[in-house]
Amino acid sequence: MNAFPRRTLFAAGAGLGTLALAACGAGEPEAPEEVDGVTKLDVGATPAPHGEILQFIQDNLAADAGLELTITTYTDYQIPNQALNDGDLDANYYQTPNFLQSQEEEKGYDFHGFDGVHIEPMGLYSATITSLDELADGDEIAIASDPANRGRGLSLLADNGVITLAEGVESVEATTADIEDNPKNLEFTEIEAAQIPRTLSDFAAGVVNGNYALDAGLKPSEEAIVLESSGEESPYSNMLVCREADKDNAGIVALDELLHSDEVKAFIEETYTDGSVLPAF
């Protein structure tokens, strides 16, 4: 039995995505509030594993560090960054460096990403086949529509010999136009990343982000046809992100330190025993 059982996470305060519906008003976003020596942080996250990891910190570590977390969960990859930019959040925890880069380039955000906390290997899943050899000529593959995860998914397929990308193309930039060789004439359909695990039966296979695989009850180590290699040097580690102006805020720095604590590492290792979430430190 795991020492730290999986738990259902309920967002404290506002409901799902509510914080993103209203900007904080005129002027610059305010720094995290400190009351009676406790810094209160509003943090956005996807439910699993990010919200679960934050809830572990709130339940077990935050008080001793002088922190109080209000955790709001989102199932959309766009809203947490918009809420952070608007000042409705003090930080968010759900994204990888390549996704942050694409968001900053596309939307002009001025954010700071801390060091990676954990890795969720992206995988190729299917409701009908169990190996790459079973892909047939002309099969349809679902990939994420957002630029960062689209490129990451195409790179996963390229790394496993399904397609070949043009020389020099980086994963954060890859599109289907960069496919140089497609021996099985596969068709690629771009849909919102969260929808892919729910619609696997509509495709021969789909490339699924680790957190969405968890949400769908998929077991990466057992059910993924292919899975990203991972390790401390992975470019896809998930990290705490805040506004650039708040990167030295003592409360946010303290939260990042807790995310890199031995206790959190043990929680990750003992909770996600199927290899779906791996420490990046």
Image (spheres, grey):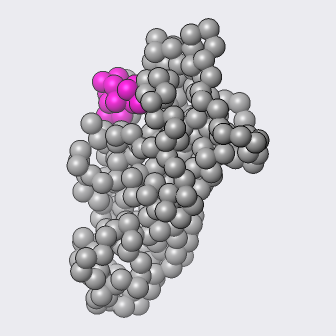
Residue at 23 percent of width and 44 percent of height: 232
**Location of residue 34 with respect to 84 vertically, above or below:** above
Query: Is residue 208 at all visible to an observer of this figure?
Result: yes
User: Is 258 a magenta residue?
Assistant: yes
Direction from residue 20 to residue 77 in the image, left or right:
left
Q: Main secondary structure of the magenta part?
A: helix
Residue at 27 percent of width and 52 percent of height: 234
Q: Which quadrant of the structure image shows residue 148?
A: bottom left
**Location of residue 93 with respect to 265 vertically, above or below:** below
**Location of residue 260 with respect to 147 vertically, above or below:** above
Residue at 40 percent of width and 25 percent of height: 258
Direction from residue 179 to residue 206 in the image, left or right:
right
Q: Residue furthest front?
A: 27
Residue 7 lies, in percent from the top left, at 52, 31
Q: Quadrant of the N terminus?
A: top left
Q: Quadrant of the C terminus?
A: top left
Query: Is residue 18 at all visible to an observer of this figure?
Result: no
Q: Which quadrant of the structure image shows residue 270?
A: top left
Residue placed most toward the observer, 253 or 192: 253
**Location of residue 55 with respect to 75 vertically, above or below:** above
Residue 75 lies, in percent from the top left, at 60, 51
Q: Residue furthest top?
A: 36
Residue at 52 percent of width and 75 percent of height: 190
Residue 254 lies, in percent from the top left, at 43, 23
| Magenta segment boundaries in residue numbering | 256-269
Residue placed most toward the observer, 16 or 40: 40
